[in-house]
Image (spheres, rainbow, N blue to C red):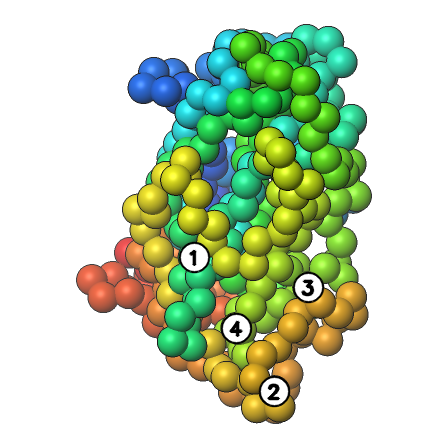
Amino acid sequence: MKKITPLAALSLTVSQVSAHYIFQQLSIGSAKYAVEKYIRANSNFNQPVVELNSTDLRCNVGANGKVTDTVTVKAGDKFTFDLDTPVYHQGPVSLYMSKAPGAASDYDGSGGWFKIYDWGPSFSGGSATWNMAGSYSYNIPSCLANGDYLLRIQSLAIHNPWPAGIPQFYVSCAQITVTGGGSAAPGPTVLIPGAFKDTDPGYTVNIYTNFNNYTVPGPAVWSCGSSGSNPVTTPGATTAQPSTSTSTSTAKPATTSSSTTLSTSTRSAAPSTTTTPVTCVVAKYGQCGGSGYIGCTVCASGSSCSVSNAYYSQCL
């Protein structure tokens, strides 16, 4: 058996860590806190969660609330999640909250979760553009009841179309105490795991073929004074931080109707063997190759596809 030296093992670990991204730092207003001070640290570095029935979908692998501090946030205040490297996999980014029955540090996230925002794609001229940023900002709903909450951010990477590829969840949870709020009862709420299924159109969709509309998986977005809705394109709320990086993929127009509705609960969104995927471009730091990879292979201007290992190539 081939022996792995300590140096080789370290090199492998570094390669694995640098392969993806993680939401690791929280800001409240203009105050930016230390990495993982109020965000539960995970034990799988910046690797994704892929099992839909895993409790790791709540806050990530090994996330431990008991060793994480809880920060006080006034209802209506702005918060920001920062990453170690900008998101570079196409897919929606969503914000969820779940009220703890007691202290946030003791809460395992097994209760109901409600969604407060989605960053989905925008469509224009046959192309889809994703908000792929290094940080994401929004505001705590001003009508939210006081108490301890888990504030969860999720990047659902759908760059490797199902079923040949498996969508990836990049998630982190912050622990917060909301003050100065109201008495609203958010909804709808969902359980995690259980909120996402391998029949959801937003999970099974092939973003390289006939991609001209999209529904973000999960419950409808809830906001003060509304029952919630699931946006199909990137919302234009003024509280959302502008995108600092985007990825555009050219969508092939539907040939059988003027619009394609991805509302079926079947797996018909899987790639067709008779359809030629359209040309698309991978943003810098995105995946461009590797064993089993079937996404884009052309890197954005100023970068080229560099092989990290047999399973992963990246635009650098």
SS of the residue under disc 3: helix
Residue 220 appears at what percent x and percent y? Answer: 67, 46
Q: Contact (CB < 8 A) between labels 4 and 3?
A: no
| Identity, as a three-letter code, of the amino acid under mark 2 | Ser
Sequence order check, earlier mark of 2 and 1: 1
Name the residue beneath numbered marker 1.
Answer: 130
Alpha-carbon distance for marks 4 and 3?
13 Å
* Residue occupying image coordinates x 39% and y 40%: 238
Can residue 161 be seen at all in this image of the molecule?
A: no
Of the residues tagged 2 and 1, which is closer to the observer? 2
Q: Secondary structure at mark 1?
A: strand
Q: Is residue 190 above or below residue 158?
A: above
Question: Mark 3 or 1 closer to N-term?
Answer: 1
| Above or below for 20 versus 96 | below
* Local crowd size for mark 2, using a 10 Å CA cut-off: few (<14), some (14–19), many (≥20): few
User: From mark 2 to mark 3, how far is it between C-alphas?
Assistant: 18 Å
Q: Residues within 10 Å of mark 3 (few under 14, many from 20)?
A: many
Within-10-Å neighbours for mark 1: few <14, some 14–19, many 20+: many
Q: Indicate which disc residue 87 carries.
A: none
Q: Amino acid at mark 4?
A: Asn
Q: Position of residue 106 (x, y in %)?
A: 71, 11
**Residue type at mark 1?**
Trp
Q: Indicate the position of residue 59 as horizontal and vertical percent values.
A: 63, 30
Tell me the residue at 61%/77% (across/down): 260
Note whether residue 38 is visible.
Answer: yes
Marks 2 and 1, how far apart at CA: 24 Å
Q: Which mark is residue 257?
A: 2
The label nearer to you, 4 versus 3, is 4
Residue on which the image places disc 3: 201
Instruction: Check disc 4 and report the residue beneath it.
Output: 212
Label 4 sits on a secondary structure element that is loop
